[in-house]
Amino acid sequence: ANIFGKPKTNTDFLPYNGDGYALNKPTQLLLVCRSAHKQDEQQDKAKAASPAAAAADSVSRRLALTLLVGAAAVGSKVSPADAAYGEAANIFGKPKTNTDFLPYNGDGFKVLIPAKWNPSKEVEFPGQVLRYEDNFDSNSNVSVMVTPTDKKSITDFGSPEEFLSKVDYLLGKQAYSGKTESEGGFDPNAVATANILETSTPSVGGKPYYFLSVLTRTADGDEGGKHQLITATVSGGKLYICKAQAGDKRWFKGARKFVESAASSFSVA
């Protein structure tokens, strides 16, 4: 309790007598300041004496800053708003599914159907097992026909053009059988024409296919003509045919995409 001894001197502070005033300075703060000042002086001297030391010190400072920023990034959490933005930008998620078409798996075949087309009960051709049409225009449609055949391959029908002549009913028969004059590009007594625009013989899964693009026109100028795409192959004693079509006017107003995609997607098991 220091009853008989001298009062202990407070070593935490040092008396400072100024001009007309007095102040106790914290010794620890003074020592720290002096130590820091001395350390800075030593570092400055070392940098002046050795450029390599100065460069090393600069690198170490940058490294420490990098580590600090990295730690902050790792420790941060993605907010719901940021996550929602990422989903909208499709940066983190799976690729978006093509919603313009719906896959259709039939008996031994598959095809992509335009999502906005509806099933139709109309039966146009022998062996028809499927028909979908545009909600706004029935001239835009796709149908699949399956009929028995003794052919082992589609190539047994001859060339694509020869095959088409055997299934020309797909293009529609002219209803009028009377006599007509030759005009507007039509032969005498003919009120409909068919022009083959393109043919190809792709192979899918080792199986040969025939593809034909045909433009048909009628004398009445309906729709300016029809683009009819036919994909055909033979498998397991059956002839599979997919026909997709659209009127010429709608063809150039966006229907082409749907007709071509449907016809090119057709394949058999």
Image: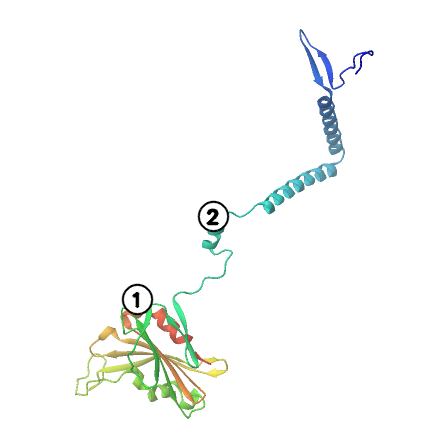
Per the image, the residue denoted by label 1 is 253
The amino acid sitting under disc 2 is Ala
**In the rendered image, which quarter is residue 236 located in?**
bottom left
- Which residue is at the far top? 20
Q: Which residue is nearer to you in this view: 187 or 142?
A: 142
* Lower position in the chain sequence, tag 2 or tag 1: 2
Q: Which residue is nearer to you in this view: 90 or 27?
A: 27
State whether residue 23 is above or below residue 206.
above
**Which callout, 2 or 1, points to the residue nearer the camera?**
2
Q: Which residue is nearer to you in this view: 258 or 57?
A: 258
Which label was assigned to residue 10?
none
Per the image, the residue denoted by label 2 is 81
**Is 163 on the left-hand or right-hand side of 57?**
left
State whether residue 10 is above or below residue 178.
above
**Is 132 on the left-hand or right-hand side of 72?**
left
- Residue 80, image x and y in percent? 49, 48
SS at circle 1? helix
**In the rendered image, which quarter is residue 228 located in?**
bottom left
**In the rendered image, which quarter is residue 120 located in?**
bottom left
The amino acid sitting under disc 1 is Lys
Q: Which residue is nearer to you in this view: 181 or 234?
A: 234
Q: Residue at x 43, y 80 (%)?
A: 109
